[in-house]
Amino acid sequence: MPGNRQAFSTAMNAADRYRWDSHWAEAAREYQRALAEFPDDAMARSGLGFCYMQTKQWQQALNEYEYTLKRDPSNVIALSKTAELYGILNRRDDAYKAYLHLADLYSQAGQGARAEAAWQKAVQLSPHDPEPHERLAAYYFGKKDISFMIQERLAAAQGYLRRNDLMAARMQCEEVLRIDTTNIQAQHAFNDEGPGAATIRAAPTGSQYGCNVYIGRGYNGGNAIWPVSFHR
């Protein structure tokens, strides 16, 4: 049964006035009255969630934003607040996934700066995961910010190495090598540091955008070492 539109509007107007004056409890009550008429209204849900955040009622705030997201997963306001609240509540994995999703939505909407900020948040939450680094690398490449692009490609390569995904790591390094055939040097060497050992270090002085990548995949018992080098 449809709610009373006039009662809804009256409550929303009152909530906005209270919110303007930072009277959060009063504003929250008015948003609740509005939601009693139209429970799925995203603006009222967002307003109530914001009031809860201002009074540090974190779980209540999260409940409101998650309610909206279940009905509209592309609502960037609700997603942004949800990601922030996951972080506050120390739900790091959920926060990481939410920021990745948020960044992708911003990127699809052509809002590069906001996408970059969300990817950086994801990196802070899970610095060893390659996905946000890979997305940042593509973003910086589009901006022709080569030094940052290379930095993120190498971080992504390191992340893939931690997963023992050598092919994906090598692909990241090959993307670096495509940028500058003169100033970029990458070396892949399978050494005997033990299965899965891996480090990525800066190239020797003289290489403008260089890197040396050492992928440990050897073993002392058979002393198996397969050197593979790329030079540009």
Image: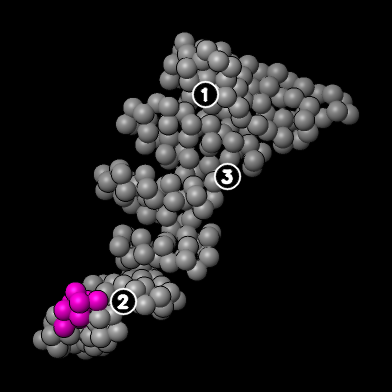
Q: Residue at x 47, y 28 (%)?
A: 150
From the image, tell me which residue sits under label 3.
Answer: 128
The disc label shown at residue 207, or none: none
Q: Quadrant of residue 47?
A: bottom left
Q: Residue at x 66, y 38 (%)?
A: 164
Q: Can the viewer see residue 39 in this picture? A: no
> Regarding mark 3 in the picture, which secondary structure is present there?
loop
13 or 163: nearer the eye?
Answer: 13
Looking at the image, residue 53 lies above or below residue 179: below
Residues at circles 3 and 1 in contact by the CB criterion of under 8 Å: no
Q: Looking at this view, name the residue that lies furthest to the right.
A: 221
Q: Quadrant of residue 213?
A: top right
Residues at circles 1 and 2 in contact by the CB criterion of under 8 Å: no
Identity, as a three-letter code, of the amino acid under mark 2: Cys
225 or 64: nearer the eye?
Answer: 64
Q: Quadrant of residue 58?
A: bottom left
Left or right side of 12 for 209: right
Distance between the alpha carbons at the discs numbered 1 and 2: 49 Å
Identity, as a three-letter code, of the amino acid under mark 3: His
Looking at the image, residue 98 lies above or below residue 195: below
Residue 120 in the image: state x and y as whole percent: 43, 46
From the image, tell me which residue sits under label 2.
Answer: 51
Distance between the alpha carbons at the discs numbered 3 and 2: 35 Å
Region of the chain picked out in magenta, as a range? 14-22
Left or right side of 28 for 124: right
Q: Reading the chain from its start, which is encountered first: label 3 or label 2?
A: 2
The colour scheme is one colour
Q: Main secondary structure of the magenta part?
A: helix
Looking at the image, residue 70 lies above or below residue 122: below
Q: Reading the chain from its start, which is encountered first: label 1 or label 2?
A: 2
From the image, tell me which residue sits under label 1.
Answer: 174
